[in-house]
Amino acid sequence: MPQRSTQYAHMTALLAVPELLVSPLGSFAQDIQPITLAGQEYVLVTIPDDKRDRYLALLPTILPRLGALSEGYEYFEQLGDIPGPLLRPIEPQFTPFLPLEMAEARRYRGKTNETFTRVMLNAAVFSGRFELAEGERIRVLDPLSGGGTTLFLALAFGYDAFGIELNRQDVDTTAVFVRQYLQGEHIRVKETDERGRRSGRRYQFEIGAKGNAQHLVLANGDAADATLHMREVVGGPRMHVIVGDLPYGIQHFGEIAPLLNKALPVWEGMLVSGGSIALSWNATRITREDMVAALQKHTQLQVLNEDVYTRFAHPVDRVIKRRDLIVAVKA
C-alpha cells in the first residue's frame, strides 16, 4: 500500500506478508515472497493448480479489505512468445459501507497510522472462529478508542462499531467529526440523545438507510468498565472482536499491568464464543512474553503464538522503536 512517509512505507512492507497469511487467502499459498518489478514492491504468491480457481474467486473480495496491500494481479512469466513478467489486474469486488477515507480525514494527536490499525483489525477478524446467525453483523469494540480510527474502519468494512475513551474531550470531538463528516457525504445519520446518563457521556449513532443501518457508539469512561458502558446499547455488551492500541507512553510492564489486570477479564466476558481480541503495544521495553503471560494469567483465551502471529513486530519512529501485536481467541 503506497504511503506518503518512507517510515510508514517500510512498516507496510513488513506487515504485508503476515496480514496476507492470517487472511482467508493465506491457507491457499504454497509460497510467498517479496519481489520488485520496475521499482515497485509486490508480494508474489504461488498457488497450487488445484486451488487456483478458488483463490481467484476469493481474491477480489478479500484483497480490498487488506491494509498493507493495495492491488492484485495475475502473474505470468510469459504469454506465448512474449517474455514476462506480465501482470493482469484483478477487478476488486468490495464496496465499503462508509468511505475508507473517513479514517484518514480524522487527524488528532497520538493517532495510530490507519494502515496499521486496518491490519490489526483484520488480524482480529480473520482469526475469529465465531459463527454468525443469519442477518447478524460483526460487532467490534475498541475500549481505548482515542479519536475513532478503528471505529471508522470497522464501519467501512460493514461492522457495528463501539468505542470507549477515558478522555471526555476526545469523545466529544469525535462525535462532532462523525456528524459533520456524514452530513458532508450526505449519509443518513440518526443520533440518540443521552445527556442524562449517570455513568458518563455516551453517543449512539444509527448510520445509513433504514433497514440496513449500522450502529456506532462512543462512550466516555474507563476501559475496565466496558460492560457497564455497553449496557443499553443495541445488542448489549456482546462483541465478536475487541481491538485495542495500548498507551505508548509506558516505560515498563508494571505501568500497564494494572489496566490489563482489571480489563482483560472484563473484555473476555464480553466476547462471544469464537470471538477474538487483538492488542498492540510499544514493545521497545515490554516483551511479547510479558503480554502472553498477562493474557494467560487473567483470561482463558487461547493466545495465537504460531510463527505468522509473531511477524507483526515493526519499528514506528525514534521513540517507539518496536511495536508488536498479539491475538487471542475465546473457545
Image (tube, rainbow, N blue to C red):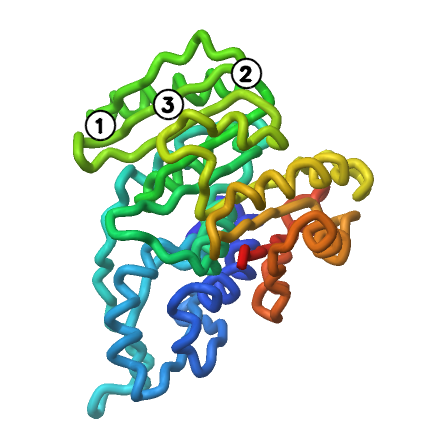
- Which residue does the numbered mark 2 point to in the structure image? 199
Expressed as whole percent of the image width and height from the top left, the position of residue 237 reads 47, 35
Q: How packed is label 2: few (under 14 Cα within 10 Å), some, or many (20 or more)?
A: few
Q: Nearer the viewer, mark 3 or mark 2?
A: 2
Left of 228 or right of it: where is 28?
A: left
Q: Are marks 1 and 3 in contact (CB under 8 Å)?
A: no
Q: Are marks 3 and 2 in contact (CB under 8 Å)?
A: no
Q: First in sequence: mark 1 or mark 2?
A: 1
Q: Which secondary structure lies at badge 3? A: strand
- Badge 2 amino acid: Ser
Expressed as whole percent of the image width and height from the top left, the position of residue 95 reads 23, 48
Query: Which of the two residues, 196 or 150, is positioned nearer the viewer here?
Result: 196
Q: How packed is label 3: few (under 14 Cα within 10 Å), some, or many (20 or more)?
A: some
Q: Residue at x 43, y 9 (%)?
A: 195
Q: Which secondary structure lies at badge 1? A: loop
Q: First in sequence: mark 3 or mark 2?
A: 2
- Which residue does the numbered mark 3 point to in the structure image? 204
- Badge 1 amino acid: Ile
Q: CA distance from mark 1 to mark 2?
A: 30 Å
Query: Which of the two residues, 132 or 181, is positioned nearer the viewer here?
Result: 132
Q: Residue at x 27, y 29 (%)?
A: 207
Q: First in sequence: mark 1 or mark 3?
A: 1
Where is 97 relative to 23, above or below?
above
Q: Which secondary structure lies at badge 2? A: loop
Q: Residue furthest left?
A: 210
